Image (spheres, helix red, strand yellow):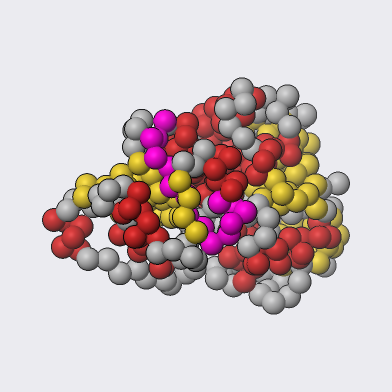
Amino acid sequence: MKAAVFYGPGIPLTVEDVDIQGPGPDEVLVKIHYSGVCHSDYRVLTGDWEYPKPMILGHEGAGTIEQVGENVKGLKVGDHVILSWIPSCKKCFHCISGRPHLCESYETKTETRRSLHGKPVYPEFRVGSFAEYAIVPESGAIKIRDDMPLDKACLIGCSVMTGVGSVINTAKVEPGSSVLVVGCGGVGLSIVQGAALTSASKIIAADLNEEKLKKAVEFGATHTIHSGKNDLIEEVMRMTDGVGVDYSFEAIGNVKTIEIAYEAIRTGGTAVIVGQAASGQKISIDPFEMSDREKKLIGCNYGSAKPDIDFPKLIDLYMMKKLDVDSMISHVVGLEELNEAFERMKKGKGLRTIVKIG
């Protein structure tokens, strides 16, 4: 199969012929039709996160089932699926307690079933969707309705699920709440949409990019802050009569903006870390203020997703035109253009890029 192979930071991705085996027990072979380009991929590309190499990047994919392994009962050849980068073992403490996005099996090593010149090639986040095919556990391929366009469906698999889920599942934002979203990329704009879906009364979007702020308004933001031209905290306090917001969401993964998101919440408010920071980073907050003012700082992984349940729900919202995925897509590229896509991401240009494969 054709796949974009990553050898290490500073080395451009190269499209190569990678060997792939058939699925093992409880696995499926998925023909990838589209894959989103996510900032988490960029973290791996730059070396912020260390993983074994060579590697096939990509984890935000959608396609069709090409082959099923032994014991697979819930999927068949031809099914349309979205890939979930945290498959569920359905046996560990977290899965049994209803939090499959924290499944303990996520960290376990599995057979890659991919090789190049006889040596293993590793799939990023157990997916590796910058390729014509992927082998994933059955629980990592979520069946969806056939009339959902796969070029939009791929974004449900990470950015949309993470953003909307952080509001609805993780923070459980109440109607009428005030919300701050720091960072208006694919995840941030999905947070804005999630806040709008919960009928938040004030949705403040902050970013350094004027075009992204305009998009945030289209997605439901009621106020915007260009944080390169204005002091973000001063503006938030002005917009909330000096109180602060009920909820803030940091969608960048930057130490400074995480601290700002925490500072922006009111007494009793909640700050949610959605963005994924580089390994080894630390933040500094005042623990007395946290206890005395009952300010909460919580983490969010994958929008606290239950993919079997949440993916179909998000797709139904899209099909009912209550969730806008189309406007998130700014570029469509082929595998050979991935290096240019990451260069745009580095410069903060465009919104979500999707890769049309095959």
| Residue 287 x/y as whole percent | 20, 63
Q: Is residue 153 above or below residue 266?
A: above
Position of 60 with respect to 176 (left or right) is right
| Residue closer to the observer: 245 or 12 | 245
What percent of the width, then of the height, locates residue 348?
Answer: 63, 62
User: 129 and 184: which one is in front?
Assistant: 184
Residue 326 visible: yes
Q: Position of residue 259 (x, y in %)?
A: 35, 64
Residue in view at x 38 percent, y 35 percent: 201
Residue 291 colored in magenta in the image = no
Q: Is residue 148 above or below residue 356?
A: above
- The residue at the point 64 percent across, 38 percent down is 325
Q: Please state if 215 lies on the left or on the right of 8 as rendered.
A: left
Q: Position of residue 263 (x, y in %)?
A: 30, 59
Q: How many marks?
A: 0
State yes or no: residue 209 in magenta: yes
- Which residue is at 64% across, 67% downward? 346
- Please give the range of residues in magenta: 199-213
Name which residue lies at 46% across and 55% down.
225
Residue 172 at least partly seen: no
Q: Is residue 215 left or right of residue 183?
A: right
